[in-house]
Image: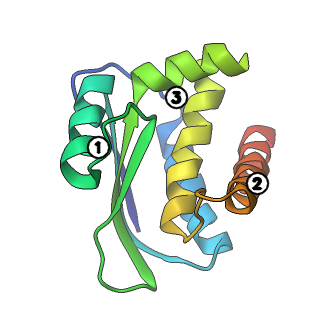
């Protein structure tokens, strides 16, 4: 159950990485989803826009793109790309710290890989509820 963090052309102020990796593994356990390998790549808006256009055919900026790489529905192997530019902008927009918003997006990607969607209003509400649950668990430790 490996969780990795890397950065592409950005600097990320991500503290307590070992603790966060363990918490992400626990999130998958709580959601009863196997985890093999998970790579988080922090990047710029432009880099994520290129991925969004190339692989998803979406010509829009976004804070996150998640790729499931495993053929086995019971075991996750994935890549999660996060735009640090979007994280900073959204932190300002929602009046939260960049650290809090970064963790929200990190958990959001993991939840996508656990099968949660956010296309409909009902799905989005459940996703927000799960994000809040994991943010509370993480930050109260």
Looking at the image, residue 112 sits to the left or right of residue 118; the answer is: left
Using the image, determine if residue 99 lies above or below residue 72: above
Foreground residue among 82 and 4 = 82
Looking at the image, residue 111 sits to the left or right of residue 53; the answer is: right
Please name the residue that numbered disc 3 is placed on: 15
Mark positioned earlier in the residue sequence (2 or 1): 1
Alpha-carbon span between mark 2 and mark 1: 24 Å
**Residue 93 appears in the rendering:** yes
Quadrant containing the N terminus is bottom left
**Residue 96 appears in the rendering:** no
The residue drawn where x is 40% and y is 37% is 82
The residue drawn where x is 32% and y is 44% is 58
Looking at the image, residue 25 sits to the left or right of residue 66; the answer is: right
Dot 1 alpha-carbon crowd within 10 angstroms: few under 14, some 14 to 19, many 20 or more:
many
Mark positioned earlier in the residue sequence (2 or 3): 3
Foreground residue among 138 and 51 = 51
Using the image, determine if residue 84 lies above or below residue 66: above
Q: Position of residue 13 (x, y in %)?
A: 46, 21
Label 3 sits on a secondary structure element that is loop
Q: Position of residue 138 (x, y in %)?
A: 71, 45
Dot 2 alpha-carbon crowd within 10 angstroms: few under 14, some 14 to 19, many 20 or more:
few
The residue drawn where x is 52% and y is 61% is 112
Badge nearest the viewer, 3 or 1? 1
Dot 3 alpha-carbon crowd within 10 angstroms: few under 14, some 14 to 19, many 20 or more:
few
Q: Quadrant of residue 32?
A: bottom right
Please name the residue that numbered disc 2 is placed on: 125
Residue 52 is tagged as: 1
Foreground residue among 61 and 89 = 61
Quadrant containing the C terminus is top right
Q: Position of residue 75 (x, y in %)?
A: 41, 80
Q: Position of residue 66 (x, y in %)?
A: 39, 54
């Amino acid at each position: 159950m490996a969780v990795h963090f890397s950065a592409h052309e950005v600097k990320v102020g991500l503290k307590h990485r070992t603790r966060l990796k363990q918490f992400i593994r626990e999130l998958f356990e709580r959601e009863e989803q196997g985890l093999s390998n998970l790579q988080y790549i922090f990047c710029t808006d432009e880099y994520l826009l290129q991925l969004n256009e190339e692989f998803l055919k979406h010509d829009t900026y976004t804070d996150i793109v998640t790729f499931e790489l495993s053929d086995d529905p019971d075991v996750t192997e994935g890549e999660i790309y996060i735009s640090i530019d979007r994280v900073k902008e959204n932190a300002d927009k929602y009046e939260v710290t960049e650290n809090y918003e970064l963790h929200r997006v990190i958990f959001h990607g993991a939840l996508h890989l656990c099968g949660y969607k956010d296309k409909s209003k009902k799905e989005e509400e459940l996703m927000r509820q799960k994000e809040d649950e994991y943010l509370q668990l993480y930050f109260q430790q």
